[in-house]
Image (cartoon, rainbow, N blue to C red):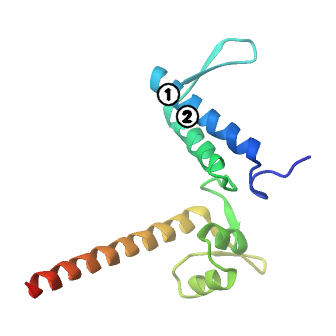
């Protein structure tokens, strides 16, 4: 039995299959404003557009050759799982927790992080990076204007 795509990269065949499936689903969404598939008894089952877009996004990641892990928003993550999702080391994540930048709960002697808390941190970090870049652009424009 093959490992799931959260443990390994997709094969060339899986990448090709995901790309084809994403294209087919996107085409179906454009035509029907949703996806209609056949149920077990052959009757049509409609898949809501929001779910269809989520499926297309998932297939897009696979078609890019990426490993994929689905994490429910209510899940409690280990520090290693959280570090992997942020693409940082576990010791760095522990520093973020100790500085109060990411909330965690202690279960026995282990720290657990809510997915929502991790996503909140990631959004704050992304916004801070965006703000810093905008400030650098503004400073560059001001310097250019003074130089004229």
Number of marks in picture: 2
Relative to residue 112, is residue 31 depicted above or below? above
Tell me the quarter of the picture where residue 8 sits: bottom right
- Residue 49 image position (x, y, % from top left): 49, 32
Residue visible at 75% across and 17% down in the picture:
40
Farthest residue to the right: give it: 1
Give whichever of 9, 44 is nearer the camera: 9
Judged from this view, the residue extending furthest toward the top is 42
- Left or right: residue 104 versus residue 132 is right
Residue 93: x %, y % from top left: 62, 80
Quarter assignment of residue 113: bottom right
Task: Give the SS element for disc 1.
Answer: helix
At 68% across and 40% down in the image, what residue appears? 16
For mark 2, what is the residue?
52
Disc 1 crowd rating (10 Å Cα; few below 14, some 14-19, many 20+) is some
Graded by Cα atoms within 10 Å as few (under 14), some (14 to 19) or many (20 or more), the crowding at tag 2 reads: many
The residue at the point 26 percent across, 76 percent down is 137
Name the one closer to the observer, 43 or 136: 136
| Number of the label disc, if any, that sits on residue 29 | 1
Drawn side of residue 139 relative to residue 93, left or right: left
Give the label, 2 or 1, closer to the camera: 1
Q: Which quadrant is the C terminus positioned in?
A: bottom left
Q: In terms of sequence position, does the residue under pointer 2 or pointer 1 come before the other?
A: 1
**Depicted 119 relative to depicted 66: above or below:** below
From the viewer's perspective, tell me whether residue 103 is left or right of residue 127: right
Determine contact: label 2, label 1, CB under 8 Å.
Answer: yes
Q: Position of residue 125 (x, y in %)?
A: 45, 73
């Amino acid at each position: 039995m093959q490992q799931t795509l959260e443990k390994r990269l997709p094969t060339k065949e899986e990448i090709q299959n995901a790309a084809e499936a994403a294209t087919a689903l996107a085409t179906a969404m454009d035509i029907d404003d949703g996806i209609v598939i056949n149920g077990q008894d052959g009757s049509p089952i409609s898949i809501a557009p929001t779910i269809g877009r989520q499926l297309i996004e998932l297939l897009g990641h696979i078609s890019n050759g990426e490993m994929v892990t689905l994490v429910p928003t209510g899940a409690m993550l280990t520090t290693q799982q959280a570090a992997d999702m942020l693409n940082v080391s576990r010791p760095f994540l522990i520093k973020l927790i100790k500085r109060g930048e990411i909330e965690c709960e202690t279960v026995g002697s282990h720290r657990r992080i809510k997915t929502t808390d991790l996503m909140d941190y990631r959004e704050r970090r992304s916004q801070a990076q965006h703000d810093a870049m905008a400030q650098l652009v503004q400073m560059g424009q001001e310097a250019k204007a003074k130089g004229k």
